[in-house]
């Protein structure tokens, strides 16, 4: 099966969810939600009905969590994901609720950022993260849902170590190649040598490396950054990736729509040649 190009779609409080995707002529998306209050039975029924009638495949649910989120190297370790003890309990509950919603809507996986996972396997905080992820993953497994981790704050080998340490069998990587660059963690093409067999989803996003040590690099339009998409898509084909390429353009307004439309054509040509 040929890889599909898709786009990120927000979960609105009311109305259709997938029309945004259909307006681009696409048949795949990842739905994103940061508001736990939207995980209602009514919203799940609406989304399931749209998937059946509109032929759009929702590859996964990107599940945000409550509390602060500072995307930098200073406050990021203190605020992001399930690593900070201060916010862990409420975020575990939110991710479990996301898994329940995904099951109800017929979505096969949830995705999130776990935060700045410790690289030292003997760090007590690393063991806490393993136990916390296992707790969530087992909840997901009971509902027939996979649990994928978006790349960014951790090195590829740390991600691999976590997956193997948790070992529940329903884990995967949502590879955002730009994030590995924005955080200065790895070259995304080389990262496939480390955790390629666990990659279940791709964010089509590009970026440049950080040059200010307190701040991340910045995101740019696909094809204008350091990901090297022709080589990236080719390498994914070589390792047998069959999933979708979900476009994520982190700006807003008309320029975002224009960039997404141009990226669709760009990726479709790369996929056809891979």
Image: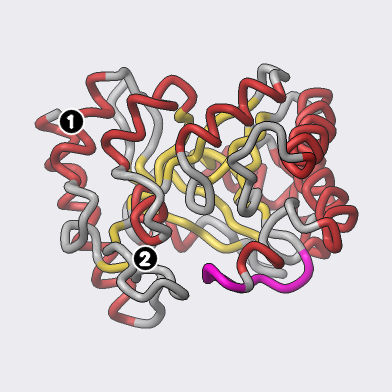
Query: Mark 1: which secondary structure?
Result: helix
Q: In this image, 224 relative to 24: left or right?
A: left
Q: Which residue is mark 1?
A: 234
Q: Nearer the viewer, residue 152 or 50?
A: 152
Any part of residue 72 in sight: yes
* Among the 4 quarters of the image, the one containing residue 130: top right
Q: Which residue is mark 2?
A: 249
| Residue 64 pos. (x, y %) | 68, 58
- Going from N to C along the chain, the mark reached first, 2 or 1, is 1
Q: Does residue 109 belong to the magenta stretch?
A: no
* Among the 4 quarters of the image, the one containing residue 186: top left
| Residue 154 pos. (x, y %) | 52, 46
Dominant SS type (magenta): loop
Which residue is rendered at x = 23% and y = 59% of the image? 222
| Residue 97 pos. (x, y %) | 83, 48
Give the vertical position of 250 relative to 144 (above or below): below
Q: Quadrant of the N terminus?
A: top left
Any part of residue 104 in sight: no
Q: Nearer the viewer, residue 30 or 226?
A: 226
State the mark number for residue 85: none
Q: CA distance from mark 2 to mark 1?
A: 22 Å
Which residue is rendered at x = 63% and y = 31% of the image? 162
Give the vertical position of 173 relative to 83 (above or below): above
């Amino acid at each position: 099966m040929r890889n599909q190009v898709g786009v990120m779609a927000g979960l609105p409080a009311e109305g259709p969810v997938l029309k945004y995707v259909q307006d681009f002529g696409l048949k795949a998306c990842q739905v994103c939600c940061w508001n736990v209050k939207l995980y209602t039975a009514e919203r799940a029924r609406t989304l399931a009905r749209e998937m059946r009638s509109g032929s759009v495949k929702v590859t996964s649910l990107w599940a945000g969590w409550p509390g602060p989120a500072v995307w930098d190297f200073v406050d990021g370790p203190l605020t992001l994901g399930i690593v900070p003890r201060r916010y862990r309990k409420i975020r575990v509950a939110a991710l479990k609720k996301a898994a329940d919603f995904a099951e109800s809507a017929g979505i096969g996986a949830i995705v999130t950022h776990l935060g700045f996972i410790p690289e030292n396997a003997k760090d007590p905080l690393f063991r806490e993260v393993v136990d916390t992820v296992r707790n969530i993953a087992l909840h997901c497994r009971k509902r027939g849902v996979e649990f994928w981790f978006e790349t960014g704050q951790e090195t590829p080998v740390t991600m691999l170590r976590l997956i193997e340490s948790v070992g529940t069998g329903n884990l995967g990587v949502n590879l955002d190649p730009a994030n590995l660059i924005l955080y200065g963690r790895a070259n995304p093409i080389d990262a496939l040598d480390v955790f390629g067999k666990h990659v279940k989803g791709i964010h089509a996003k590009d970026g440049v490396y950080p040059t200010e040590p307190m701040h991340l690099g910045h995101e740019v339009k696909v094809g204008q950054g350091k990901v090297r998409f022709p080589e990236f898509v080719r390498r994914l084909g070589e390792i047998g990736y069959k999933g979708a390429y979900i476009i994520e353009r982190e700006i807003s307004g008309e320029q975002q729509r224009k960039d997404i439309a141009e990226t669709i054509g760009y990726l479709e040509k790369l996929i056809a040649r891979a």
